[in-house]
């Protein structure tokens, strides 16, 4: 798909002889650039290359850097994660953090987010804290979205527990403890 989009862009950019086409061409090229960038983002998020090559910490750093470019201040702190888990567990942790960070930005309109990921022996402690809108937990539990329920399922699969502390107009803190991180 990326090759096809790049080919279309090349064909359109070679159209030099029609004046009325130039305005249209600029809009098409811009849209194609957006499509290619979106395709790269989707592919990277499906199975981040950096996760496969360099591990969880670098993949998380890259993910947080992408959000910083959009104006959100994200502080990532990792400790003891060098004794990394199996790739499947790393991917689950990545997906959990990806969803929590995305929720903080999209739904809570957070301006600053603190992400901590600490490994102590076979346990991993994750904290995501934001200064967003917060929410009423009782109301949210009745109409829980797919994202948060997927996070809960992943945490349960990894034999972990999750605690949510949130307050309207103050922000949200989510603490996760994963109890059995098997080493590579």
Image (cartoon, rainbow, N blue to C red):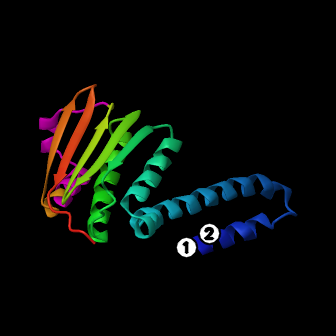
Disc number placed over residue 170 in the picture, else none: none
Check the image and report above or below for 17 versus 114: below
Count of numbered labels shown in the rendering: 2
Q: Position of residue 49 (x, y in %)?
A: 46, 67
Decide if residue 53 is on the left or right side of residue 166.
Answer: right
Q: Nearer the viewer, residue 169 or 16?
A: 169
Identify the residue under disc 1.
1
Cβ atoms under marks 2 and 1 closer than 8 Å: yes
Most common SS among magenta residues: helix
Tag 2 residue? 5
The answer to which image quadrant residue 87 occupies is bottom left
Question: Quick check: 12 above or below 22?
Answer: below
Q: Please, what secondary structure does the residue beneath circle 1 have?
A: loop
Q: Is residue 140 magenta?
A: yes
Q: Nearer the viewer, residue 15 or 132?
A: 132
Secondary structure of the residue carrying tag 2 is: helix
Q: Which residues are magenta?
A: 133-154
Q: Locate residue 125, reporting x and y percent.
A: 22, 49
Quarter of the view holding residue 124: bottom left
**Placement of the C terminus among the 4 image quadrants:** bottom left
Q: How busy is the neighbourhood of tag 2: few (under 14 within 10 Å), some, or many (20 plus)?
A: some
Q: Nearer the viewer, residue 32 or 125?
A: 125
Badge 1: few (under 14), some or many (20 or more) residues near its Cα, within 10 Å? few
Residue at 81% x, 66% y is: 15
Q: CA distance from mark 2 to mark 1?
A: 6 Å
Q: Nearer the viewer, residue 167 or 123?
A: 123
Please name the residue shown 24% across and 37% down the image: 173
Q: Residue at position x 15%, y 36% from top?
A: 137
Which residue is located at x 27 percent, y 26 percent?
170
Q: Position of residue 46 (x, y in %)?
A: 40, 66
Instruction: Single out the residue that lies furthest toward the top.
Output: 169
């Amino acid at each position: 798909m990326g090759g096809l989009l790049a080919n279309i862009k090349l064909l359109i950019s070679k159209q030099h002889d029609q004046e009325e086409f130039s305005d249209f061409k600029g809009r098409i090229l811009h849209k194609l650039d957006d499509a290619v960038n979106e395709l790269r983002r989707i592919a990277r998020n499906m199975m981040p290359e950096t996760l496969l090559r360099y591990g969880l910490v670098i993949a998380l750093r890259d993910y947080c850097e992408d959000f910083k470019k959009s104006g959100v201040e994200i502080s990532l702190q990792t400790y003891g994660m060098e004794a990394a888990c199996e790739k499947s567990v790393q991917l689950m942790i990545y997906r959990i953090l990806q969803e929590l960070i995305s929720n903080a930005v999209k739904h809570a309109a957070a301006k600053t987010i603190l992400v901590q990921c600490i490994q102590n022996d076979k346990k991993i402690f994750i904290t995501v804290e934001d200064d967003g809108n917060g929410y009423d937990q009782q109301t949210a539990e009745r109409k829980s979205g797919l994202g948060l329920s997927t996070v809960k399922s992943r945490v349960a699969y990894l034999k972990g527990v999750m605690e949510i502390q949130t307050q309207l107009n103050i922000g949200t803190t989510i603490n996760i403890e994963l109890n059995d991180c098997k080493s590579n």
